[in-house]
Amino acid sequence: MFRRTFVASPLAVTATLFSASALHAAPKKPGIVSLTFDDGLRSQKNALVIMQQLGLVGTLFVIADPNTPTTPESSPSSDPTILRVQRFSWSDIIEFHNAGWEVGAHSVHHEKLTNLSDRELCWELDDCRHIITRNTGIVPQAFASPDGAYDDRTLVEIQKRFRSHFGVWGAGPLTKADLLCNPNRIDPYEVCRLGVTGKIPPVRDLFGFIDKAMATGYWLNLVYHNILPPDQILADDNLSVRVDVFKETALYLSSLQRGKAIRVMTVTGAQDQIYVDYPWSPVARALATKRPPI
Ligand SMILES: [Zn+2]
């Protein structure tokens, strides 16, 4: 797949011409870290409790159909009863929202969008927005592709409906080089996330990525699935993260935020902040004006 080129508005291009040197300058503001949580899993309430105590907020990417079973990627069990119990209710999602979290969309059925027909693709994108809004009153601004699978065709349709789009390093077209986003040049429709699992990366490596965001002023996005006590993680479950390990990361981020060395923000909050910090950035300018129709 050819990497999509972000097309800035004429106004933003003019701004770019006047500030080309600024675009290539190193970011001057503190780096940003966004913690995202996919699939609407009940165990993510463990993250809510920890983050609330530390004054941190995150972003949920919710599957809109409550009857869609969780995917193998996010569940250690194939038992349909357990799968249903593991999913959020709409009131759970409102609870996160009331705690300052962002609610983004993650399709209706968690199908790989790249496998869908044009009609099915538009239906997944339109309906996930409408279902979430109808049940919570929240209009999702950000979208994460299921399994990180996207291409030029799906991005065109996502761009019509959402302010931003998130993939995952290691799935789809995104590479390690995309992981830390330079706020001067970020494409809001190909934001890369680092998948945090029980084993990859080890916590010290994760702290290394956070330190890099701090040193460079870049934006780092993390994605989690289940956050579980150790005794609830099955031996072959490589995806779930232990509650104590998650807490260690949250404590580290909290201490950095208190020292004003890093900012922990929701994904849309981060983009709004990038616009404030780097108003010459064509992407940030486009972000500030791009709102999906309600
Ligand atoms: Zn997912």
Image (tube, helix red, strand yellow):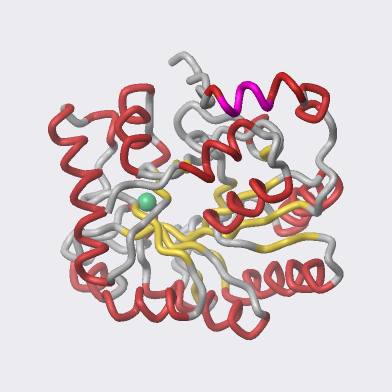
Prevailing SS of the magenta stretch = helix
What residue lies at 51% left-to-right and 74% top-to-bottom?
100
Residue 124 against residue 4 in the figure, above or below: below
What residue lies at 35% left-to-right and 77% top-to-bottom?
94
Residue farthest to the left, as pictured:
119
Residue 227 in percent (x, y) is at 50, 70
Residue 163 in percent (x, y) is at 43, 44
Q: Which stretch appears magenta?
A: 11-15
Which quadrant, please, contains the C terminus?
bottom left
What residue lies at 57% left-to-right and 58% top-to-bottom?
269
Magenta segment includes 17: no
Position of 268 with respect to 24 (left or right) is: left
Residue 200 in percent (x, y) is at 61, 50
What residue lies at 60% left-to-right and 77% top-to-bottom?
51
* Viewer-proximal residue among 285 and 105: 285
Residue 33 sits in quarter: bottom right
Position of 263 with respect to 10 (left or right) is: right
Residue 166 against residue 198 in the figure, above or below: above
